[in-house]
């Protein structure tokens, strides 16, 4: 009994970081006030005397205001950073654990290879959790036979893999990671002949499993496809008949027009006759004429379907490329959910996003250590900071959520009218009963759904179920970022506050794949940027929607993220305007002899040194700060530009934002070699690379011409800052110069892109000179 009284978790305030952060805020904030005083007095003087063009001074002032506004928002993350520790060994017995449903989403087997997706599925099934309380759901938004076949094969292999994991208490339960060089064997069993024999047999079955998936893969080689063409064609035709006529795009094996398909894998025991977790394949209905709302729509379908099959009170959300690296993650989450003091007001427990394919160089900022030119902040430190000012911001995967928090059902009265519930949750009486009464659904022991159950789940996965209901508005998933805001909304809970926890244990609980080439990185950042900008331009703008729902600091946390793409405005101003004025001899900054020169120099140096301090304290090298700064500049020049334009055009109805999957099929050998060697792969769309190259050429030209002018006119004192700005950008992004001029390998920047960029830079310089100088 004494053991159960011990705390299951502990929260520790990072006092040293807190003191450093607040001193930094105060000192830099004071310097910024002095900077703005200089700008205002300078603008007033220019307006009175007309000694210098007003427009460039005004643009630079506005950009500095925007940078400062965003910097202020980001300081909410630095206000009170905390860390948390959990004690799973103090948990009660397995019989006290609540059930958990695992949601995994995939959409296209050509971009999300089935082998990787199935490794995630199997690792989730192998969690160190009572198997009778675990259910795994895979949403296949592509409606692909390739994925359905892979799920069936994964189910067969897991009957052997799960007993092996349990018997030897393996730490790594993702078979792909276990049998690769990434993981070493457990020292306890190196000399155990029984273990080695079983391991060899399991590895043989895993290789057979991989071969089966490769034979049915959309990327299979021609020889394999030819050998198995009759079998694949027969199975594929059967699958098409189930989906409906003309429902599958044969060229891609992905369906955009099909009826719902739900398959519960039966045979409830594994090779050792122990119970298996539930595994369910879900392909929701999709029709070309109906909006499907991408991942949010897929998760809505999963939460409805799972409610009538397992209805677990907690849900683990995973990306299809994020496998379970530590099987105890569910137990760690239960250290919070089984604490009676905080469980009633706890909505989700978040684990960090970490990746197993990052090289020592991390050229593309795969760790997601976001860096902003003047005011840096880490993705991990965002979490630590957000946890200390009101709760973690949900990241979209690696989180255990409370089902009733998604429903918002804490406020449902027992005597509420059934028709009122149907307005919120749709027409399914069974779903409403399960939601309102928190019943556990009855699934036959053989896990074969009855005709009534099969009909019900097909209704819940239909594309018109959400019509005339609150799904997608109040009682469901919405785009991940806004979903987090709704979960934090105190008005959705009966208690006075809502708690959210982030757990970052020494061994990462989940490991995923990050983009390792420039094209995928910029596309991914652009996709995220569009979503963030759409929220910022809607009525759910964090600064407006958060008032009264969240604390001020917590609202600032959400606003800081949602306004990320706005960095494109001050970035482009400071990447173009001072450079053109340098060529024209128009000073925009104080002379070296002016006391305010120290203010500008201090703001720059203080922010850079703060970033270095955060990099080093987190355990990374100094080079990481350079990679992050360079990647931030590239994202601002390219991804954020298109994200902002796309969101604005979508807002005024001239363009519809699209969802582009990040390619998770892996790089080819040459791309992988470039990444490991620390060289950028610039083989991306010209539309993505040209803005980066254009700004680089413009800065090179402005620096060379500007320095010549400074030497000629001996104006170094008043033009030093303006000469430093393009020099800093050129040095930080020197690999762009290598890609355009020095490199001859496949990853270089194409000559046609360099020519196009030079033409764009020339146009900007000429046009800017006319506007700012003449």
Image (spheres, grey):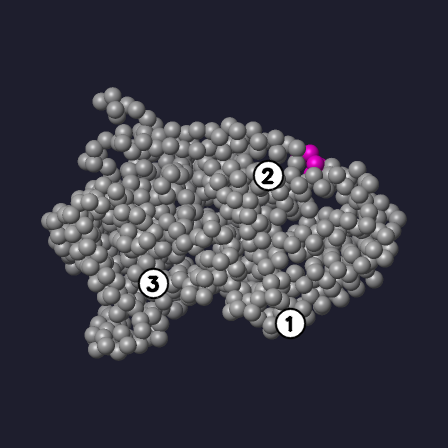
For the point 37% across and 49% down, which residue is it?
511
Considering only order in the chain, which callout, 2 or 1, is on the residue closer to the N terminus? 2
Residue 392 lies left or right of residue 424; in this view the side is right
- Residue 32 included in the magenta stretch of the image: yes
In the picture, the disc for residue 615 is none
Q: Which residue is mark 2?
A: 610
- Horizontal and vertical percent for residue 339? 31, 30
- The x, y position of residue 138, in whole percent, is 29, 56
Q: Earlier in the sequence, mark 3 or mark 2?
A: 3
Give the number of the disc on residue 755: 1
Q: Is residue 10 above or below residue 752?
A: above
158 displayed left or right of 605? left
| Foreground label between 1 and 3 | 1
Residue 456 visible in the shown view: no
Q: Position of residue 755 (x, y in %)?
A: 64, 72
Q: Is residue 742 left or right of residue 580?
A: left
Local SS, label 1: helix
What type of secondary structure mainly makes up the magenta span? helix
Q: Which mark is residue 113?
A: 3
* CA distance for labels 1 and 2: 38 Å
Q: Which stretch appears magenta?
A: 29-33
């Amino acid at each position: 009994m004494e053991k159960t009284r011990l705390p299951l978790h502990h929260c520790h305030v990072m006092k040293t970081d807190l003191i450093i952060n607040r001193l930094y805020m105060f000192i830099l904030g004071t310097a910024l006030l002095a900077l703005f005083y200089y700008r205002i007095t300078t603008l007033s003087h220019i307006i009175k005397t007309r000694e210098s063009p007003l427009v460039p001074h005004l643009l630079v002032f506005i950009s500095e205001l925007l940078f400062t506004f965003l910097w202020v928002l980001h300081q909410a993350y630095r206000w009170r950073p905390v860390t948390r520790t959990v004690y799973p060994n103090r948990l009660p017995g397995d019989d006290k654990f609540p059930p958990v449903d695992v949601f995994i989403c995939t959409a296209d087997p050509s971009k999300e290879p089935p082998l990787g997706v199935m490794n995630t599925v199997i690792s989730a099934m192998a969690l160190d959790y009572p198997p009778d309380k675990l259910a795994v759901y895979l949403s296949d938004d592509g409606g692909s036979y390739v994925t359905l076949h892979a799920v069936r094969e994964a189910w067969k292999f897991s009957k052997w893999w799960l007993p092996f994991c349990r018997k030897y208490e393996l730490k790594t339960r993702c078979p792909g990671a276990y049998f690769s060089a990434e993981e070493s064997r457990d020292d306890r069993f190196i000399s155990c002949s029984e273990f080695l024999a079983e391991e060899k047999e399991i590895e043989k079955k895993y290789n057979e499993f991989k071969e089966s998936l490769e034979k049915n893969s959309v990327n299979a080689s021609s020889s394999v496809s030819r050998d198995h063409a009759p079998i694949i064609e027969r199975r594929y035709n059967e699958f098409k008949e189930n989906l409906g006529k003309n429902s599958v795009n044969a060229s891609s094996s992905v369906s955009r027009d099909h009826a719902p398909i739900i398959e519960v894998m039966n045979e409830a025991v594994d090779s050792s006759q122990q119970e298996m977790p539930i595994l369910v394949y879900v392909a929701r209905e999709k029709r070309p004429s109906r909006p499907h709302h991408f991942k949010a729509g897929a998760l809505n379908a999963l939460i409805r379907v799972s409610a009538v099959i397992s209805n677990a009170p907690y849900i683990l959300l995973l990306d299809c490329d994020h496998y379970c690296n530590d099987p105890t993650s569910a137990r760690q989450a239960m250290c919070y959910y089984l604490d009676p003091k905080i469980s009633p007001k706890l909505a989700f427990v978040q684990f960090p996003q970490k990746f197993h394919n990052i090289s020592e160089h991390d050229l593309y900022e795969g760790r997601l250590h976001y860096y902003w030119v003047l005011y840096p902040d880490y993705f991990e430190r965002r979490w630590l900071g957000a946890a200390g000012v009101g709760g973690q911001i949900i990241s979209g995967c690696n989180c255990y959520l409370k089902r009733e928090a998604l429903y918002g059902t804490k406020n449902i009265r027992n005597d509420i009218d059934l028709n009122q519930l149907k307005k919120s949750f749709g027409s399914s009486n069974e779903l409403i009963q399960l939601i309102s009464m928190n019943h556990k659904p009855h699934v036959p022991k053989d896990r074969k759904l009855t005709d009534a159950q099969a009909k019900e789940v097909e209704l819940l996965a239909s594309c018109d179920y959400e019509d005339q209901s609150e799904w997608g508005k109040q009682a469901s998933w919405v785009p991940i970022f806004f979903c987090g805001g709704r979960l934090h909304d105190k008005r959705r809970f009966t208690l006075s506050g809502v708690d959210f926890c982030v757990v970052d244990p020494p061994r990462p609980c989940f490991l995923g794949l990050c983009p390792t080439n420039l094209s995928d990185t910029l596309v991914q950042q652009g996709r995220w940027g569009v979503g963030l900008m759409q929220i910022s331009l809607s009525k759910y703008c964090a600064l407006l929607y958060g008032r009264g729902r969240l604390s001020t600091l917590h609202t600032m946390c959400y606003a800081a993220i949602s306004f990320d793409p706005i960095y494109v405005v001050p970035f482009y101003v400071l990447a173009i305007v001072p450079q053109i004025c340098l060529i024209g001899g128009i000073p925009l900054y104080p002379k070296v002899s002016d006391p305010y020169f120290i203010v500008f120099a201090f703001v720059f140096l203080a922010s850079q040194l703060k970033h270095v301090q955060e990099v080093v304290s987190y355990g990374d090298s100094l080079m990481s700060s350079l990679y992050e700064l360079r990647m931030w500049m590239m994202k601002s020049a390219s991804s954020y530009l298109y994200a902002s334009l796309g969101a604005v055009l979508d807002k005024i109805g001239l363009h519809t934002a699209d969802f582009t999957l990040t390619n998770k099929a892996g790089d080819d050998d040459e791309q992988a070699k470039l990444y490991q060697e620390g060289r950028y792969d610039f083989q991306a769309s010209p539309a993505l690379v040209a803005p980066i190259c254009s700004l680089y050429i413009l800065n090179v030209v402005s620096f060379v011409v500007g320095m010549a002018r400074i030497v000629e006119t001996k104006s170094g004192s008043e033009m030093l800052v303006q000469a430093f700005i393009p020099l800093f950008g050129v040095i930080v992004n020197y690999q762009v110069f290598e890609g355009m001029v020095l490199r001859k390998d496949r990853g270089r920047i194409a000559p046609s892109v360099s020519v196009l960029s030079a033409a764009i830079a020339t146009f900007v310089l000429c046009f800017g000179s006319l506007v700012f100088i003449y």
